[in-house]
Image (cartoon, rainbow, N blue to C red):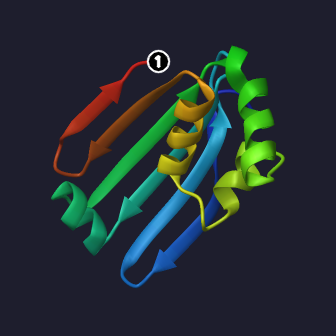
Amino acid sequence: MAEAGKLYEVARFAAGDDLRIMFVGEGSRGEAVLREDICGPSVVDAYDADAARLQVVINASQVYVLERALREVFGTASLEAFAADEENDILDLMDLCDREGIAYAYACVDSGGDAGLRPA
């Protein structure tokens, strides 16, 4: 994974007027981080805002379990490979974590100032 505490853009997907940018990285304590920045008409419909930032953080002790689940379910070797596949989004990762019992923290903030947090 990348340098601790930094996120790196791994993919940029455009569909119509919507844009989705995927970032991955490692938290300061070895956590796996996936962030999805989205903007466009579908964000307005879903969030009543022009843009939103969603982030999932997986505890360092669960990263191995996550990588195993990504291989078994999605056939990908890493979180980076998962995020680089246009068919996958952050909700797919959350569903996988819920199904596999992998604890994660979730945060969302939109351009209208609304925010949500679900601690691990």
Q: Is residue 56 visible?
A: yes
Determine the residue positioned at 38% across, 33% down: 107
Residue 32: image x %, image y %? 65, 30
| 19 versus 76 height, above or below | below
Task: Provide the residue designation for mark 1.
Answer: 120
Residue 58 position, x and y percent, is: 60, 26
Residue with the most extreme bottom position: 16
In the visual, does 48 lie left or right of 100?
left
Q: Nearer the viewer, residue 55 or 91?
A: 91
The amino acid type of the residue labelled 1 equals Ala
SS at circle 1 = loop
Where 41 falls versus 2 (above or below)?
below
Query: Residue shown at 42%/31% (left/top)?
Result: 106
Query: Label 1 crowding class (10 Å Cα cut-off): few <14, some 14-19, many 20+?
Result: few
Pinpoint residue 1: horizontal percent, then vertical percent. Answer: 79, 37
Residue at position x 60%, y 66% in the image: 87
User: Which residue is at the front of the view, 96 or 83?
Assistant: 96
Could you say which is closer to the camera, residue 103 or residue 24?
103
Say which of 10 and 92 sits in front: 92
